[in-house]
Amino acid sequence: MDNNALKNFIIPGIFFISILTCSRPESLQFSYHEIKGPDGESVWTTTEQVHRFTDPADLNNDGYIDVLAFTDQALEWFEYPEWNKYAVQLGRNWEVGRLHAADLDADGDLDLVTAKRLEDNSRPVVWFENPLPDGDVHDSNAWIEHPVGTIPPRESGDYIKEYNSADFDRDGKLDIVVGTFANPVNTPAELFYFFQNSADDFAMKMVTYEWGHEGMDLGDLDQDGDIDVVVNGRWFETPAEPRTGEYPEHNIDEKWYNQRDNWQRNATDVKVADINGDNRPDVIISHSEKPDYPLSWYSAADPTGVWTEHVIDPNYGWCQTLDAGDIDLDGDIDILAGRFERDGPPLVGSPQDVRIYLNNGNGSAWNPLPLPDDAQSTSPDDAEGGMYDGKLADIDQDGDLDVIGARTYWHGPIYYIRNELRKGGVK
C-alpha cells in the first residue's frame, strides 16, 4: 500500500477519511502460537464440539490469562501456560453467545455469565460462581450455578449474542445486560437488564428497539456517572431510575441499522474507547456480516446530538473481530480488526486476515499492519484464514497486549498472536 494511499479529506461536520500509511515500527513484532495441550495436540475438539466463542480471563487468580471456550455442549476453560482443559459444566443445551467473565459476587475472582435454551425456547440466564478463594477452580462440581432470570420464548427464531455487566443502578452490585436479536428481519430486538439484589435474586427490565442485531458495548457516553449501552449504530441512555425509568435511544449513524434485506442485516461489532484523547468516549463500529462497509470511529461533543464519522478503513466489512487498546504502548488507543474465511456461502472476500491499526495519536491517521495468523489457505473451502471474535489481552503478563481467538466460527485452532514489544512472560 502506498504511504499516502488515502488523502485526508473532510465533508464539514459529518464525515472524515483518515490517512492510511503502511510501515511497521521496528520494535513492534508479533509471533503466532497455537494453543495446544500438554500432549502437543490442539485444544480444539471435534466438529461436533466446536469452540465457537472464546474469551480471555484469569480464572485461577494466578495473574496470567486463561482462555474460556464455549461449545453447544460444554463450557470449558484452558489454563495458562500448559493449556490443560477444565470443565465448568458439560452436557447442557447452551444458548451459545459471546462469553462474559465478571466478579458478580465481589469476592475477588471472576465468575461467568451465560444462558441456556429450553425445549420451549425460553432462555434462562445464569451465572456460575467461581469456587475461589476457598474451593478448587479445577473441579467442575465446585462451580455453583445461580439463576438470573428467564428471557421468554418467541414464535420466530431468537438469539442471544451479547452479555455484559456493570453497576447500572449504582447500588454497589454488578448488574447484567443481555442483547438479543431475532428472525424474521422485521422482528424487534431487545436489551434485558438484570439488576442484582442478591446472588440468586435479580430484577429484570426489557428495552425493545427496531432493527437490531449483534454488536454491543458499554460506556458512560454522556458522562453523567452511570453506564450506558451502545448497540449497532445507536446508544441507550441509562435513566436516573434504571429499574423503572425509560431508556432514551440516541442515533450515532443509521447506516448500521437501516438494512432490511436478510439475516445479515444490521450486524455489527462495537467498541467504546477514547480514540482522540479528548477524555470523551468515542464509538468504533464495523459490519460483521456484510462486505463494502467501512471500519469507522465516531466522536461527538454532545452524544445526544450529531456524531461525526471518521473512517479508518473505507472497505473492511465482514469484520467479526474488533477490539481497542494501546498495542504499541505509545499512549493512545489502537484498533484490532479481523475477518475469517467461512465454510460456505456467503463467502468472505480476500483478505481473510487479522490486523491492527496503529493510531497516530488523535485518530486522524492510521497505520494498518497485518498480523501472523499462520494461514495457508488455497481456496475458500480451506477456511484457514483469519480469526473469529478475537480479543486483546496480555496473555503472558509481560506488559503488552496480545491477540487471542479462534480461527473460525466452525473450527479451530484456538490461537494467540504474541506481541513481542516486551520480551518477558512465558510463550
Image (tube, grey):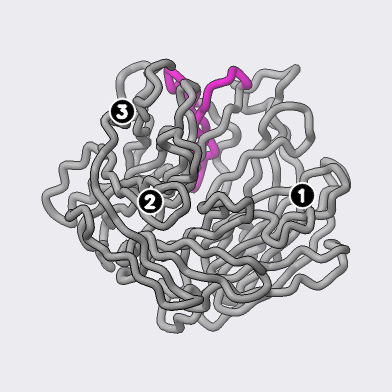
In front of the other: label 1 or label 3? 3
Q: Residue at horizontal 37%, vertical 26%?
A: 421
What residue did someone put label 1 on?
A: 175
Mark 2 Cα within 10 Å, few/some/many (few <14, many 20+)? many
Up the image or down, 312 lies above or below 142; here it is below
Q: Say whether disc 1 or disc 3 marks the residue closer to the N-terminus.
A: 3
- Disc 2 marks a residue whose amino acid type is Ala
Q: Secondary structure at mark 3?
A: loop
Residue most toward the left? 378
Which residues are drawn in magenta? 61-85
- Disc 3 marks a residue whose amino acid type is Ser
- Disc 1 marks a residue whose amino acid type is Asp
Disc 1 to disc 3, C-alpha distance:
41 Å
Q: Nearer the viewer, residue 136 or 274?
A: 274
Query: Can residue 410 be seen?
Result: no
Q: Nearer the viewer, residue 323 or 128?
A: 323
Where residue 321 appears, as percent x and y from the top left, is: 41, 51
Up the image or down, 323 lies above or below 237; here it is above
Q: Say whether disc 1 or disc 2 marks the residue closer to the N-terminus.
A: 1
What residue did someone put label 3 on?
A: 27
Q: Residue at horizontal 16%, vertical 47%?
A: 377
Query: Can residue 89 be seen?
Result: yes
What residue did someone put label 2 on?
A: 337
In contact (CB < 8 Å): disc 1 and disc 3 = no
